[in-house]
């Protein structure tokens, strides 16, 4: 008896000819942030933002907000998100006047040299859902050459905390862009 016959006896070589029928696992359920069949892509860009504007995204799915600015003067750059009329805890993100990135009370430990920002910079907020209602937020600052100068990460916000409006502090900017998914109406 050779090896092939032994393997056929042990592993039932005839099973290779039987068709495999995939069956769904009744225990596992697809997470909400992976269900995208009823969603459409959102891409909006502003060059002027006056007052409060609706974020208009599904915060249960990943989204990105990009703010492009020229050389900063010595004032805080701040974008406020999650503005709702019945909620007072909004999320403020941005760059402090002394060169530190911040997400509300969480402040980056590394200072960004103002000389690196003279050519202009971008603040990029990427928010990804983690699981049961929580999210992972990453705020990074990049120069115009595409180099990341600093990054700040947080896991303390729920996905619904990002829902609502957004407002930019009085600051001239080149563009404000949001990318993500939106539910069909």
Image (cartoon, rainbow, N blue to C red):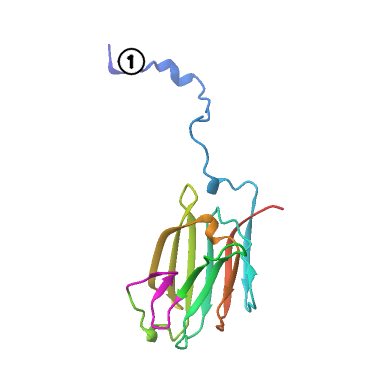
State whether residue 136 is above or below residue 20.
below
Q: Position of residue 19 (x, y in %)?
A: 52, 22
Q: Position of residue 73 (x, y in %)?
A: 47, 88
Q: Residues within 10 Å of mark 1 (few under 14, many from 20)?
A: few
Specify the segment rendered in magenta. 95-109
What residue did someone put label 1 on? 10
SS for dot 1: helix
Q: Position of residue 95 (x, y in %)?
A: 44, 77
Please name whichever residue, 47 or 91, is drawn nearer the observer in this view of the structure.
91
Which residue sits furthest right?
185
State whether residue 176 is above or below residue 63.
below
Give me the residue at 53% from left, 27% from top. Answer: 23
Q: Position of residue 59 (x, y in %)?
A: 56, 56
Residue 2 placement: quadrant: top left
Q: Is residue 67 left or right of residue 148?
A: right
Is 111 magenta? The answer is no
């Amino acid at each position: 008896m050779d090896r092939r016959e032994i393997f056929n006896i042990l592993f039932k070589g005839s099973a290779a000819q039987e068709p495999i029928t995939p069956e769904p696992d009744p225990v596992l359920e697809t997470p909400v942030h992976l269900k995208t069949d009823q969603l459409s892509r959102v891409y909006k860009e502003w060059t002027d933002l006056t007052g409060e504007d609706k974020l208009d995204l599904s915060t249960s799915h990943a989204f990105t907000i990009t703010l492009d600015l020229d050389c900063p003067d010595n004032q805080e750059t701040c974008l406020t998100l999650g503005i709702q009329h019945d909620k007072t805890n909004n999320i403020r993100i941005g760059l402090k006047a002394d060169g530190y990135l911040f997400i509300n009370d969480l402040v980056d430990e590394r200072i960004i040299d103002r000389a690196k920002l003279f050519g202009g910079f971008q603040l990029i907020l990427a928010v990804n859902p983690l699981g049961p209602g929580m999210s992972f937020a990453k705020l990074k600052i990049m120069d115009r050459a595409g180099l990341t100068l600093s990054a700040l990460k947080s896991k303390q916000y729920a996905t619904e905390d990002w829902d609502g409006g957004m407002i930019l502090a009085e600051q001239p900017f080149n563009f404000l862009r949001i990318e993500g998914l939106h539910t069909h109406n």
